[in-house]
């Protein structure tokens, strides 16, 4: 039986969190669709009637939107921390290296910032793995 490398373990955790995030996002979008009938007061309306704005925010809370948004933010933050940790680990195999590349691809596709240090570490892994044993 082979043991998972730390990078593979982190990649699995990121995958699980991404699936959870997708479910939370779907739930939030469903709640938003139900909430759309209660349009937010305009700035002028809110200034004229602050209670309308308060009622709108309470309705968002009651619909579960604020909780879902906070959950999404927390999951995104956890994914980001795990991705940073994954990219910081040295690759022990070509599979680890491929996982790092996939992580960088996801970051780029999501509009994230790829740090020069992440690319430098990736190239260092390539050089280290290319050296004869």
Image: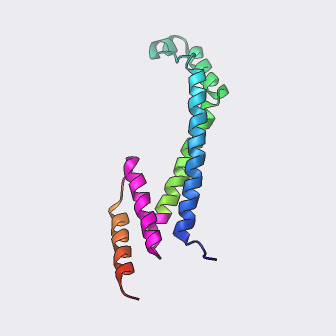
Seen at 57% across and 66% down, the residue is: 9
Outermost residue toward the front in this view: 1
Residue at the outermost right position = 62
Residue 4 or 80: which is nearer the viewer? 4
Q: Residue 69: horizontal and vertical position, in percent?
A: 57, 37
Q: Is residue 2 something one can see in this rendering?
A: yes
Q: Quadrant of residue 1?
A: bottom right
State the residue at coordinates (36%, 74%). Answer: 126
Residue 5: x and y, percent? Answer: 55, 72
93 part of magenta stretch:
yes
Q: How many marks?
A: 0
Q: Give me the residue at 51% from left, 15% from top.
A: 41
- Pick whichever, 42 or 48, lies toward us: 42
Where, quadrant-wise, is the C terminus in this rendering? bottom left
Does residue 69 appear in this view? no
Considering the whole magenta stretch, tell me its main secondary structure.
helix
Question: On the image, which quarter does residue 97 sit in?
Answer: bottom left
Residue 97 covered by magenta stretch: yes
Q: Which residues are magenta?
A: 86-113
State whether residue 11 is above or below residue 94.
above
Q: Where residue 106 sits: x, y (%)?
A: 42, 53
Q: x, y (%) of residue 76?
A: 52, 48
Tell me what residue is drawn at x 36 percent, y 53 percent. 113
In the rendered view, does 69 fall on the left or right side of 88?
Answer: right
127 in relation to 61, above or below:
below
């Amino acid at each position: 039986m082979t043991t998972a490398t730390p990078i593979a373990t982190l990649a699995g955790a990121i995958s699980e969190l991404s699936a959870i995030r997708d479910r939370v996002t779907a739930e939030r979008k469903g709640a938003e669709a139900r909430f759309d009938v209660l349009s937010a007061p305009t700035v002028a309306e809110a200034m004229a009637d602050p209670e309308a704005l308060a009622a709108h925010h309470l309705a968002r809370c009651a619909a579960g939107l604020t909780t879902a948004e906070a959950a999404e933010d927390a999951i995104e933050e956890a994914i980001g921390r795990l991705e940073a940790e994954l990219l910081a680990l040295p690759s022990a195999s070509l599979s680890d290296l491929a996982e790092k590349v996939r992580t960088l691809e996801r970051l780029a596709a999501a509009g994230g910032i790829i740090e020069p240090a992440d690319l430098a570490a990736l190239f260092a892994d390539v050089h280290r793995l290319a050296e004869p044993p």
